[in-house]
Image: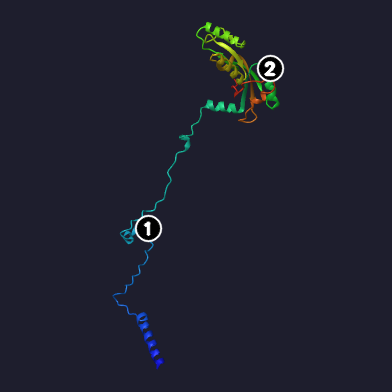
Amino acid sequence: MRAFCLLLLLVNALYFIWSNVIDVQVSSLDRVPPRPAVPPPRIVLAKEAQQNPRETGPAEEPTPPIRDVVPPKVDPLESAGNVQPPAAEVASTEDRMTCTSVGPFSDLGQASQAQATLRSLGFEPRQRVEQGELWTGYWVSVRDFATRDAAEAALKILNQNGLTDVYLMPGAEPDNVLSLGVFSDYQRAQRRAEQVKAIGLSPEISDRKRSGSVFWLDVNLKEPGQTIDTSVFQVGQSRILRLELRACPKSG
C-alpha cells in the first residue's frame, strides 16, 4: 500500500513538471512576429546608374560620369630657372679650373725656388713679372698725434722705456705717424702693441704692403679643379708669406 502511494506521488510530480515546463502554451498575442527577410541591395554599375537613376533610390546621389584624366602641360625649366651665366664668367671659371697663377713673389730668387718646387711635383710652371702690391708684414704704428711735437715727445718716452727701434715717419699720410715695427708673425706684432699700450699710447696693427715688380708662376693643372697646396713653399728658413692662387691671365 505504501509503495502504491509513493507511485502516485511520483506520477503527480512528473505531470506537474511536464505541464508547467515542457508543454507550455504561448498565446498568439505574446508571440513576436517574425521579421521579413530583406534582400541585399543589387550591385549596379556606374553606367546603369547613370541610365536609370530611379533604381538607386531617393537617398542616393547619382554617380558622376567617369572621364579620362589628362595631365596638365608643364613648360620646360629652361624658360624659368635655367639662366645661363655671362660668357665672361664662364670663361673665367674654365681658366681657373685649367690654369692657376701662384704668387706674388718679392724677388727672382723666391720665384726660382718656387718654380723648382713645382717642377719636382710634376708641373711645368711659367714665370712672369708684373707691377703690383706685395705684402711685407704686420705693421704696428701710433697715429693719433695732433702735432709733430706730440709725436716727438711720445718717441722720447718710447726710447726711455727700451723701445729704440721706433721712428717718426717722414711725409706720412696721415701726418705724425710713429712706426713701431713690421713683423711677419702676428703674435710678435701683438706683443709689441701690448708694450706700447702699457706706456699709455694707442697702437694699431695693419697690413703693410709695398708697390713694385712682383713675380708670378702660371701652372697648367693636371686635371680640372685641381688645387696647389701653398704649404710646400713654406719649408726652410726662407719662408714665402701670403701666397695667393688666382686664375691665369688670358693670353694675348
* Mark 2 or mark 1, earlier in chain: 1
Which mark is on residue 47? 1
Secondary structure under the numbered disc 1 in the rendered image: helix
Furthest toward the left, the residue is 29
38 and 202: which is toward the camera: 202
Q: Is residue 40 left or right of residue 82?
A: left
Furthest toward the bottom, the residue is 1
* 222 is higher (above) or lower (below) than 54: above
Furthest toward the top, the residue is 149
* 18 is higher (above) or lower (below) than 172: below
Q: What residue is rendered at 56% in x and 28% in y?
A: 93
Label 2, residues with CA under 10 Å away: few <14, some 14-19, many ≥20? few
Quadrant in which residue 5 is drawn = bottom left
* Amino acid type, mark 2: Gly
Residue 220: percent from the left, percent from the top?
Answer: 64, 26
* 106 is higher (above) or lower (below) than 62: above
Which mark is on residue 109? 2
Residue 116: percent from the left, percent from the top?
Answer: 70, 22
Label 1, residues with CA under 10 Å away: few <14, some 14-19, many ≥20? few
Q: What residue is rendered at 56% in x and 13% in y?
A: 199
Q: Is residue 71 left or right of residue 177?
A: left
Quarter containing the N terminus:
bottom left
Quadrant in which residue 181 is drawn = top right
Instruction: For marks 2 and 1, give the CA distance.
Output: 94 Å
